Image (cartoon, helix red, strand yellow):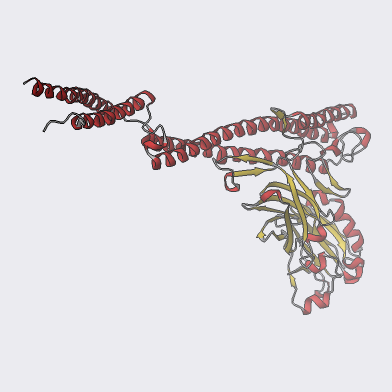
Amino acid sequence: MARINTNIPSLIAQTNLTRNNSDLNVRLERLSTGLRINRGGDDPAGLIISERIRSDISGVNQGIKNSQRASSVISTTEASLAEVNDLLTSIRALLVESANTGASSAEEREANQLQIDSAIDSITRISNTASFGGLKMLDGSLDYRLSGLATSAISIANIRSATLINNQPLQVNVDVITSAQFGSVFMSGHGGVIMSTMTIEIAGAKGAREFQFLSGTSLTSVAAAINQLSEFTGVQAALINGNAASGIYFRSTDFGDDNFVSVRRQDKPTVSSSDSFQTYKLLDTSAFVTGGSFNWSGFVTGGNLVSADIDYGRDVAALVNGNLATGKGLEVSVNSSSLAARILLNQDLATTPTATASSFYITGGGSLFQLGPNVTPLQQTAMGIASVSASRLGATQTTNGLEFLTSLKQGGNNDIGASAGRNDFSTAEDILSRAIDDVTQMRGRLGAFERNVLDTNVRSLQSQFENLTASESAIRDADFAAETSLLTRSQVLVSANTSSLQLANAQAQQVLQLLQG
């Protein structure tokens, strides 16, 4: 049958021509953009996952940049600290030179004091001026802010890192569970005097000295003689309960496992057994350390007093927010995922395990580094960078209280100038050594952060970046070989469809032959 009102072959050819033209346009678009997915209709599921991966790639790339910038900040800070270290080393040389008073004039010591003053001022200047892109690094602005710190219980709280969730203050609880102790050796009174001539060796963490005491020498004089050389031995002496008749005790000058006291008689006794030299130690000296009286009979009955000629001190042990802190003398250090801190306890708190826990709050501050692709606490690292001003370095407990590097300046409690009339620079040495430790530990902490956190983070993120980019490419990028092949196919089909449509339209002309016949 021949119908001309409806040309079915032409409609079929038009439909296929439209479809093939559309496919041809898709191939041309993909080849021109290089992407297999240009709009949601190309692959809805693929578009969703590829956009998520693109977001991850962007975050990872920025995380790499953040880490590299943080590394630059740390390197700049460490360079400034290296200058402070050099200045402290020069002060050490001047201090050692000035201590050689037998071979240096008063004028030389005064000149050395001027150099020390200049070096200390330079340390403070570096602290106030070291910066990176307008960010002050060593003036304390990147340190943590504290509130509620009871100086009667905690002398210094150096917060190295803290996690503050939603900018809420972090409470820090310090609960002493084991008291800090001196090394202590006790000797009974024997009437408050030495009963026979004897030679005693007194040894401690700083060294040993021999003392010879004649028969009848009072224990008060014995204590005074030992205390005159405490700087050489690290041992102090005092009357038990302030009464020579009760005896004398020998104590290390500092708390902690590194400190000890040894009292030994060097000569052989030639007197009766009633005059025998005997020393003792307490198995637990906490009651005596915290101000309790020494009770000979009570300690013997309780089994706390044992015969000994040497005793070691004990480091304090404390829980900081439930974590067992590492003790060192009166100092505790904690390093957990939420808090890293070095806390110097007051003697009253450190020697009283029954005391109420001391608390303070970290209210803010510190420097926060965003190292991961997502803004979450798990992908952030915080750390505090304390001030290295001379008024903050070298905190050392002395007879004058807590003293810092500034006490070495002219007119300070520990200056070396000839006008001060001092020949004992041991306290200045302790403060300077502590200041050097403060700076070197800070440099080590920053170096460890750069090497173990930033550098490894960059390498890890770079690996993620490569893998994510490969995954996104596999989903979204066009396969040029396949697309070129499909383009050729579409071109052939469009050409064939065009010819078919031409033939279909020409079929209607055949009806005219019926009319002409």
| 73 displayed left or right of 225 | left
Q: Is residue 28 visible?
A: yes
Q: Residue furthest left?
A: 517
Residue 105's spot in the image, x, y percent?
A: 88, 28
At x 24%, y 25%, the residue is: 494
Looking at the image, the residue that sits furthest to the top is: 516
Which residue is nearer to you in this view: 99 or 445? Answer: 445
Depth order, front residue of 311/490: 490
Image-based side of 474 in relation to 10, left or right: right
**Residue 423: horizontal and vertical position, in percent?**
87, 39
**Which quadrant of the figure contains the N terminus?**
top left
Residue drawn at x 85%, y 56% is 152
Q: Residue furthest bottom?
A: 301
Q: Is residue 266 visible?
A: no
Q: Which of the pair 449/50 is nearer the observer?
A: 50
Percent coordinates x, y for residue 3 in the rendering: 16, 31
Q: Position of residue 87 (x, y in %)?
A: 75, 30
Residue 194 found in image quarter: bottom right
Q: Is 234 displayed left or right of 339 in the figure? A: right
Q: Residue at x 82, y 34 (%)?
A: 100
**Quarter of the rendering occupied by the C terminus:** top left
